[in-house]
Image (cartoon, rainbow, N blue to C red):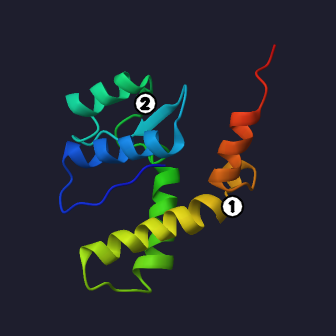
Amino acid sequence: MGWSIADHMRSELVVDALQMARWQRQPVATIVRADRGAQYTSWMFGHRLREAGLLGSMGRVASSQDNAAMESFWSVMQRKLFDQHSWASRTQLASAIFEWIEGWYNPRRRHTSLGMLSPHEFETLAATAQPAA
């Protein structure tokens, strides 16, 4: 997962998050699932996906299944981070979000959809798995 923080929801925000995910995770043959928001349907986001060799995927309008994993993520972050703390600056907030995602969520939070592995464990396992003959 890549992430970015800003005071807007323009295409630059999701492109920054995509760039971060590429830099940090170095994905190959990955499908990027997004909703139909203008920032995800923008030329710039699509261009960066193609440039990275990634495949964009969008579901049907008003389908609750499309965003289930992301809605779960936001729900957990809301309860575990935002509802329990406040920050004096945007820099402090960005640091707290980074620490929460990279220090707890990705390395330790187990997911039923990933066979009770953390995102980091799942990525490591997927990267070392031998391709089927």
Q: State the quadrant of the C terminus.
A: top right
Amino acid residing under circle 1: Arg
Q: Separation of disc 2 and disc 1 at Cα?
A: 25 Å
Name the residue nearer the viewer: 31 or 18. 18
Rendering coords of residue 100 (x, y %): 50, 70
Rendering coords of residue 83 (x, y %): 41, 83
Residue at the disc numbered 2: 57
Position above or below: 132 against 2: above
Q: Crowding near pointer 2: few (<14 within 10 Å), some, many (20+)?
A: few
Label at residue 3 = none
Residue at the disc numbered 1: 110
Q: Secondary structure at mark 1?
A: loop
Name the residue nearer the viewer: 30 or 65. 30
Q: Is residue 110 left or right of residue 94?
A: right
Q: Is residue 57 left or right of residue 9?
A: right
Location of residue 60 (image quadrant): top left
Amino acid residing under circle 2: Ser
